[in-house]
Amino acid sequence: MRKDAKRVAVSTLMQCCIDLKPTRKENEVYIDRKIDVTKLVEFIEEKKKQGIHYTYFHAFLTAIAKVMYNRPKLNRFISNRHMYEHNEILLSFVAKMSLDDKSEELMLVVPIEEDDSMETISAKTKAKVENLRGKSADKAGANNAADILGKMPNLIRVPIFALIKFLGKFGLLPSSLTDNNIYFSSMIISNLGSIRCGAIYHNLADFGTCSSLTTIGEIYNEVMVSDEGKESVRKVCDIGVTLDERIGDGFYFARSVAMIEHILQNPEMLNEPVSTKIEF
């Protein structure tokens, strides 16, 4: 019995697939998507005029949270050859203390409640980043554990990590190792657009409970042709999604990515609670 998730029954065929390919790296599937974010850019600019400062990253976090509430299979993972569903939605990312080569990187996990919207998700995210970048940064959970374990010699550190990986399979790790740990989240999100980089495909880790990872590229202009044959310059953004194919199928994944696109092209939906049912 895990404290962070509930067991989910699987079909006999799926159980055989899990046994034949028991690791995430054997089950990675990749989806890329070019999304027209012209309306999202206008939405955020209009909010800025109202004195509300959202970022594109906050918009993507909210859109992904809405999709995960509407598509619960995305919140599942395989551990010790069993399928589980997280008890809550946890979105995670890595933040640099400052934008330079030598800056320290820290893990952040944002818990999403069903009544959260872009307003509250933005506030939560800003508060966590400001806390870690402040003069008296509170490195609680996995960030603090990494500081301690990373300084140990190989003779001690390697067997400790072997034990950590073993206990992680059964959900027996203490919160000091799982809190603020991106590998124990619903999805890892990497905002590569903030460093002027395009979206990439990123591998999943066999450690932990995270079955999906999304990278977000920078926003750029592109000439697009409408169904009527009319050309126009639009704001677009590329995303790359890596998923464990054991938690769903191609149809489920494709519709989930299409739902992210639908939300970002109708950004007023970001004002609604993330648990709002979406029909599209």
Image: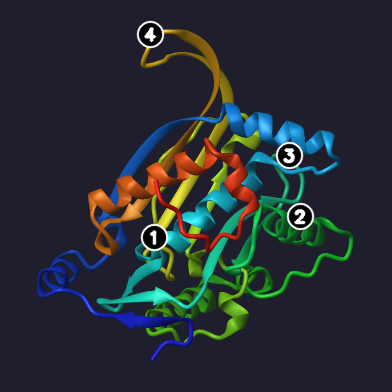
Marks 3/1: CA distance? 37 Å
Q: Secondary structure beneath disc 1?
A: loop
Q: Which circle, 4 or 1, is nearer the viewer? A: 4
Q: Residue at x 61, y 64 (%)?
A: 109
The residue where tag 3 is placed is: 100
The amino acid on which the numbered mark 2 sits, given as a three-letter code, is Lys
Q: Which circle, 1 or 2, is nearer the viewer? A: 1
Is 219 rendered above or below residue 145?
Answer: above
Q: Which circle, 3 or 1, is nearer the viewer? A: 1
The residue where tag 2 is placed is: 126
Tag 1 or tag 3, which sits nearer the N-term? 1
Tag 2 or tag 3, which sits nearer the N-term? 3
Is residue 13 shown left or right of residue 202? Answer: left
Q: Where is residue 210 in the image (x, y as percent from the top left)?
A: 43, 64
Q: Would you say the residues marked 3 and 2 are in contact, meaning their CB atoms lie under 8 Å apart?
A: no
The amino acid on which the numbered mark 4 sits, given as a three-letter code, is Gly
Is residue 92 shown left or right of residue 30? Answer: right
Tag 1 or tag 4, which sits nearer the N-term? 1
Is residue 252 shown left or right of residue 139? Answer: left
Tag 2 or tag 1, which sits nearer the N-term? 1
Q: Quadrant of the N terminus?
A: bottom left
The residue where tag 1 is placed is: 71
- Checking the image for residue 229, the label placed there is 4
Q: Would you say the residues marked 2 and 4 are in contact, meaning their CB atoms lie under 8 Å apart?
A: no
Residue sitting nearer the eye, 199 or 278: 278
Residue count near mark 3 (Cα–Cα under 10 Å), binned few <14, some 14–19, many ≥20: few
Residue count near mark 4 (Cα–Cα under 10 Å), binned few <14, some 14–19, many ≥20: few
